Every structure is written in structure tokens, then in C-alpha cells.
Amino acid sequence: MDRSTLSRAVFPGAPESRPGRAAALAALLTVTAFCAADAVARSYPFGPRTRSVNDLGNQYVPFHAHLWDLLHGRADGGLLVNWQSGYGSSFLPDLGTYLSSPFALLVAVFPRDEIDLAVYVVTVLKTACAGAAMAWLLPRLRPGRWWAAGLLGAAYALCGWTLADAAYNPMWLDGLVALPLLCLVGEWTLTGRHRLAGVLVVALAWIANFYTAYMATLGAGLVLLLRLWLLGLERRRALAVAGRAAATVALGVGLSAPLVTVIYYGTKHAYPGRVTHFAPVGTEDLLARLLPTTYSFSSPALFVGTTALLLALALPFHRAAPGRVRAGWPVLVALVTLSLQWTPTHLAWHAFATPNGSPYRQTFVLCALLVITAWYALSYGAPGPRALGAAGALLAVIAAAASGSGVVRSVAWPVLALGATGALGGLALLARAERGGRSGRTAADDPAEADGDAGTGTSDAPPGRAPRPGRHRSLLVGFAVLLLTGAQLGEATATSAVATRLRLAHLDDYAPWGSRQRTQADAIARADGWPRYRTDPGREQTVGNDPLLVGGEGAQYYSSLTADVLSRMLTALGDGWTSRGRSLQSLDNDVTDAVFSVGARVHSPPDPHQNWYPPDGERVTVSREEVPPLVTVRPAAAPTAHTGVSAFGPSPYRNQELLLGARVYTVPRLTVRTAAGGRPDPSDDDRPGLRIGAPARGTAAGRGPTITARCAAGDEVYLWAPHFSGTARLAGAAAAAPVGRFRSDHPVTKIAAMQRLGTVPASGQVRVDLSPNRTGTVPDGAVGCLDPARLRTAVRRLTSTGATEVRVSDGTVRAQLPPGSTGTAVLAAPRIAGWRCAAGDGPAEPARQFYGLIAVPLDGSATSVTCTFRPPGLRLGAAVGGASLLILALLGALAAVRARRAGGRPLPRPTTRPRERTTSAL
């Protein structure tokens, strides 16, 4: 008997499973519902509404644009250093966090100006592959109908977590794909098959997105443990399977270590952001998220469709299923649900760190368990009236309990009613067809029930062969499939459309690539002079990573891995940020432009998409300044650890002078007055300065708080008010004078950057008119008056003693210095961990700091400086990865030797899966 015949004899439902067809059906249904929902919501690319909300527009689209540039050889930097963001940031951790998925490479085949479409296609493709992977897995767990596997695979891919959370966090979708694949690896360990492939699958999952792969690995481990219990293996064999699984995971994670360790160390050196504490949601909100069209940012999106939910609820009452199956899967679902709500297990799911943002990022694991539970229920035949009635009653209880939740909107009830009607009707028709034609399996022809009494049907057909269905039964099954598919597609489409519209209403949103970005990119390309000087894309940003999206090299940078030293240094210099210090903004300031060698700066009108409507005729312009080279020489003594960012003082003007090496600002005494002419009260919270409130209703037009001071005529006036929100204008200035737009909030998640307001008039009297839009503060020393002549003198001095030539290639900077240079060579880049420098032919040593910048001591003998960057953790990761690869090779060689000793033929492999242990029906 050949293997296929033996397989059919052991698993009579196996040919019916047709995993290829199931995967194709799941992918088709997923793409159909996903795209139809965006068409209904009139969202990009099927409508005028942008889908670039929150981090999708700020991070993921720009990072994919940078990947496009890398793949086409157009990026400033390489895999080690991104020279376009944050004046030089470590790129490999960002690559591993946002771009290491194999799907991300597909952006290279799209035009650069269609990067939003490229990210959308990648998102849809990942979601479809997740559905296909689940549809492929389900028949491996237990044979069943191929169309049912396809339908439930689509239910998994279109779960609430995907539609509400992962649709705009596309790198999380790699975990959605990984979970069924890792469960498949668990099935391989049961039979000892595909050991090399299993290791490679684990490695690929962890490389694609280690964060969700970690959660998926935990979920797959729970599935494997339950499978071992259901199979009732003897302890020795069960431990052997568990050992093989652990070894597979260890070797796979080891192969991914070169990337994972770099990301780990990147998080250790990142700005800490906000420390959050987990607070579980209420039970009614938790239950409500099982229903269609519910939406909330801070609760677990558990929707898997009414069909899958009803099947999962029916399993405990499904008398055709063995007792262990009826108990095991529902108990696992319940335990994982409870683990979402308990702080210790919440931390375990999230690698022992409560995330900033959505606190239920592991929800897709529970959605997968619900779908697998539903598959087990259907694989034993459609639930009968008793089981289906109990499931319907439980669904009614869930709906009643959730009716008071704020996440349930009026649209949920008609969608739920239609979905439940379709699901119940389809399952009832399917059960009737099975009773008429006996498509369900019994103990006589199902190995999972052969030694138990769970099977209840009878048939005259020979074992392993189902009778040919009649025309009536075929029609019933066809109608059932249409009802179930329609219910699934309708609910998923409605849920996705509602989530898309509500996200747009509740989160920040950004315009897709258009004329504004195209004009900015063209202006930057014409002005580009890297590495002779930097070209900053400008203060009026479009997204949080403009340099990655439109080009140039600036301070602006938004990542979960924004370096602590960079954020603290730029904050001390007067820069602004959002996302609690991890989204740094461009700092439009002549002194910092000189320090960081910004020789060209783009000036754009405010982004109309953000409701800052530009004046008529305002357009994109480029200003140019003579600036020192990227590497300068300071006559100070060799820097020590005491010249890091901690050496900065409270005044950003004085801090800028420390980096410049010259006194160029006057910081005058200020007089601050309220709109009523009185002195403001001191701040009563953690924001320093005088309290400035928004004008009360009835205040005369044009009246607002003011700041007055005296400076030298002709100086440039800057205002530093990080906790002020509103506009500021220099009194008496021309209509074309700049208007400072400040944005801050409290509790502090964003602060405003220092801004130029204009030129001091001949009288020397400075008056700044404030128009606050919320309560804020004005700190002591808020106004600084810059002397342009002194700045030009300082720039000429730094240029004359600076590098004569600078060459930059990815993670290496080489600079030629004037002979006899002494003091300190300063590279205008943040001294993030990983930089090593050498003067001349001397040995490379960890780079020193010059107030947060890279510094190298000079003794007069060296005429060059070389700095190289290697991200922390890369050497350790490479060692672990090499060791894992060596172990894998040794295991492969050992298997080959054993095969030769067995007579030159491969060792026999199991041809059947272990049988699930059965018990009496409960």
C-alpha cells in the first residue's frame, strides 16, 4: 500500500481537506472583504479619505520610502547608519523593527511616488497570506471540509485585531502570518518531519517582526501543549516532542539573533518615552469586542465573525466530539482570555513591558484559538440543534451583557442580526444535509474516535469512503456555504469599514503622497550637497519623518528607537517633539544650522491637510547659508564624560553657544503681561514659567498676553516657549514676517520648538504678542536675540580650522584635517552607542562626547580622523547566529550519517499522525 492510499485509509476526510484550495479561498475572501471595506469607507486607494493615520503616516510609509531608496541606491546611508534622520541614526534596529519582513521588499517594484499604494498592497498581501496560512493549518490539525477551512482562515485574517489595530501597523501583520506557520511547525515536531524547515520558519518569523513573533511563539506553544494532552501520549514521548519543539525554537531564534539582539540593544539606548501601567478593560467591553462593528483603541478586538464564534461556543455541547476535545479547546480559550486581563500575564505577553499605545497587542493569538476551536467543532460534523441552540443562547447572553458598553454603536445590532441569521441558517442547513447524506464522520471511519463512543452516526458505506451525496444534499450544502460566506464577508466588511472611519475621526491623519511632497522632493534634490552640507526638509513638516519621505538630512526623526542622547541633546537646544520625546522636529535656527552643517533649508507653507491654511501665493522656497563642514576642530581640551548632554544648562540659547564655541545671543530680561495687563501667576504644575491662559470669551479682539524686552537693533528675535500652545508674532512686524506656531499639551506628550519671529526694530524695543489656544507657560529666558555678525565670525573660524575634505559611506566617516590640528575634532552627529573613532593611524577607541556630539581628541600629529559605526549587539548576535547555524549543520550531518549507517536509505518516518485520545461524550 503506497503512502497516499495509507493516508486515505487512516484519514478518510483528508482528500476532502484540499489545503491548496482552502488557502486560495481564504486569500480570496480576505482580499475581497478588505478592499470592499475600504471602498465602502471611501478610503485610499478607493476613495478620497486618507488611510495614513497615526504611525502609519508618520513612521511606516516613510520607512518604506527609505527602503525603496536603499533598494534603488538613492538613500543617504546604508544598513548601518541612516544619515537622513536625526542628524545620523542607527538604521539596523529600525530595519528590524519596521522593514525586515520579506513582504517589505515588494515596495521596490512600485514607483517612488506610489509609496502609499505599495504599503497598502503589502498590507493586503500580508493579511491574505495570514488567512491562507491558517486555512492550510486547520486540516493538519484535523481533517475537514476544504471550503470550511478557507472560510475560517478568512475569519482569522479578518479578525477584529487585524481590522482595528494591525491594518495601520502593518509590521504586526507578520505575527498574524507567523502564528499558523509556527503551529504547523508544532505539528511537524509531533511526527519528527521537516526539522530543518521548522527551524527556518521560526527564524523567518522572528526576523520578519520579532515583537509579534514572540507572541505567536507563545501561542503556538500553548496549542502544541494542548495537542499533546489531547493525543494522550506517554510521558517519555510527550517530553521528546516538547524537547524537539524547544530545540527548533531555540535554533530558529538563534539564527535571527544578529537582528534581534541589535533591536534589543537599540531599545536599551532609546529615549524612554512614557511609563504606562496596565489597566484591564471592563467585562462588558471585553465581551462587546466579540461583536461586529465595535471599535475602541484600548480594548481587545476579539471579533472573528459570528459563524466562527457560534462554532466555538457550540463545541462544549457538540456530542459528536470527544470529551477531551470538548473540554480542552474551550478551557484554553478561557485561560488565554483571562491572561489578557491579569497584569502578570499581560506583561508576559508583551515581553515584560507594557506598551505605549494599544495594551492588547496579543489579541490575535486569542482570535486564532477561537478559530481553531470553531474548526474542531465543525470537523466533527455540523453541530446539531442542541449544540447550536446552546451556542445561540450564549451569543444572546454575550450581546445582552455587551449592550451597555460604549464601544457598541447602533450599527452593530443590524449587522449582528444579519450575521447571526446567516450563520445559524447556514449551519442548520449543513446539519440537515449531513443527517440526510451522512457527511459527518463516525467512530467506524475516524481514527480520532475509533476507540471511543463519541461518534453517533451510522452508514452502510465501507470504512474510509463516504456515500455519494444526492442532488438535494448538494443543494443544501451549496446554500449553506453561500449563507456562511455571505455572513462572514458582510460582517467583516462592515467591521473594517466602521474601524476605518472611526480611526480617521479619532487619530491624527496625514495626506498621501501628492503635489506638496513632490514639490518638496524636487526642491531638496536641487539643493542637495551631502556630505559637504546638509539639506533640511524644513520646519513645516508633513509627517514625522519628512527626511525619509521627501529626502534631505535633518533633525526630524520618529521611531520607537529614537536615541536617548539625541532626544535630550535636541531638547536642550530648544527643539520640539511629540510622542513623548520620540518624534523629534526640525529646528529652524541659524546657530544649530551652523553647528550641524545645514547649508540649505526648505521653507514650505503649512500643510493644508493639518488645517493650517497657507496665505495666497506662499510657495516652497530654499534658503542657503555658509556653514562649517561636517567635521570641525575645537580648541578645547580633550572631552570627557562630563561634556555629555548632562553638562547642558537650562537655557537653550546658552547651550547652543556651548556647541558653537562663541557667545552670539543676548538673553534679555522679560516683562510678561496677561491680556488684562496684569502679571501672570507662576505655573501650578510641572511646566516651569508663568501661567498663560487662553483669552476668556468677551475679551476685546486683538488683545492677548504680551512679552516685552530690549535688544540691539538688527538682532534676530527667537522665542523659546516649549509649553506654550498658540501663535506668537513680533509687534509692528511686516505682514510677511514669520508667525510662530507653537503646539504643546498637558500632561506633556508634545513640546513646541524654538522659533524665529523676526528682526529687532531700530528702537530696540521687542514686543511679542501671544495668542494662546490653551493654558500654557512662558519660561524665564524665553526670548533670545541673535547677533548675525557674531554668528558669521564664529562660522568663518570653524570653517577655517575644520576639515578640508569629508567622505561618508554608510557607517564610516573619514575627514582630512589641516596639519597640526590640536584640540578636539567634532563630528556633527549625535554620539549614539556604537561609534568608534581613530585620529590618524592610531587605534580606534570608543568615541568621546562633545555635548552629545561625536568627538575625537587631537594632539597635533594626525591629519585625518576616521569614525566607524557598529550597532550595539551586532557582534553578540552574529556569534549566536553562527553558533546556531553550526549546530544546525552538525545535526544535519549527523542525520545523514545515521541514514548511511541504516543502509544508504533515509530513516523511516511516521506516515500517520498520532491519534487524539478520546473519552466518553460528556
Image (cartoon, grey):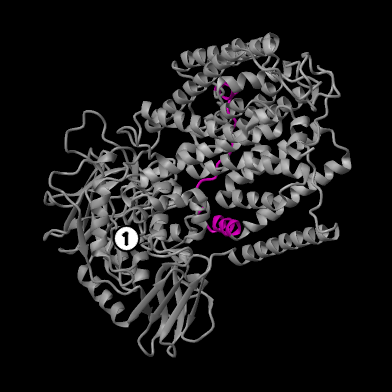
Which is nearer the eye, 465 or 196?
465
Residue at the disc numbered 1: 552
Give the magenta range.
Answer: 259-288
Q: Quadrant of residue 287?
A: top right
> The N terminus appears in which quarter of the rendering?
top right
Position above or below: 789 against 510: below
Q: Residue at x 34, y 41 (%)?
A: 510
The answer to whether residue 684 shows anywhere in this view is: no
- Residue 571 horizontal/vertical position (percent): 40, 57
Q: How many marks?
A: 1
Crowd band around label 1 with a 10 angstrom C-alpha radius: few (<14), some (14–19), many (20+): many
Residue 608 location, x and y as percent? Answer: 24, 41
Residue 372 left/right relative to 615: right
Q: Residue at x 33, y 69 (%)?
A: 595
Q: Secondary structure at mark 1?
A: loop
Q: Residue furthest front?
A: 1
| Residue drawn at point x = 78 percent, y = 13 percent | 458
The x, y position of residue 742, in whole percent, is 30, 46
Residue 442, given in percent of the width and then of the height, sits at: 77, 19
Up the image or down, 331 lies above or below 803; here it is: above
| Between 452 and 536, the one nearer to me in the picture | 452
Query: In the image, what residue type sits under mark 1?
Result: Gly
